[in-house]
Amino acid sequence: MSDHVYKMVNVVGSSKASVDDAIQKAVTKASRSIHNLEWFEVENIRGHIQDGKVGHFQVTMKLGFRLDD
């Protein structure tokens, strides 16, 4: 492994379908404007309840990306 320097940003993904879908949407959207994304870390999972059922999921996570040399 080379000596790289990384930066982290916090994002929140949301989805009506699942936690996994919320993660996928957040990573996909972030990758459109941040290059060299290399990892993510889920910090928090929460959701919204509507009529006694899960209305949507929210996932707070850190994304790590490698800074250019």
Image (cartoon, rainbow, N blue to C red):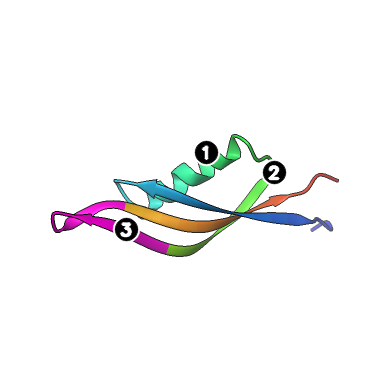
| Residue 56 horizontal side relative to residue 12, left or right | left
Q: Give the Cα distance between marks 2 and 1.
A: 14 Å
Q: How many marks?
A: 3
Q: Amino acid at mark 1?
A: Lys
Residue 46, position as x, y percentages in the image: 36, 61
Residue count near mark 2 (Cα–Cα under 10 Å), binned few <14, some 14–19, many ≥20: few
Disc number at residue 36? 2
Q: Give the Cα distance between marks 3 and 1.
A: 20 Å
Q: Which residues are magenta?
A: 45-56
**Which residue is rendered at x = 65% and y = 50% of the image?**
38
In the image, residue 23 lies in the stretch drawn in magenta: no
Disc number at residue 59? none
Residue 18, position as x, y percentages in the image: 32, 51
Q: Give the Cα distance between marks 3 and 2.
A: 29 Å
State the residue position of label 3.
47
**Which residue is rendered at x = 40% and y = 62% of the image?**
45
Q: Which residue is the extreme one toward the bottom?
A: 43
**Which residue is rendered at x = 45% and y = 42% of the image?**
25
- Mark 1 lies on a secondary structure that is helix
Q: Nearer the viewer, residue 8 or 18?
A: 8
Residue 23, position as x, y percentages in the image: 45, 50
Disc number at residue 29? 1
Q: Amino acid at mark 2?
A: Asn
- Mark 2 lies on a secondary structure that is loop
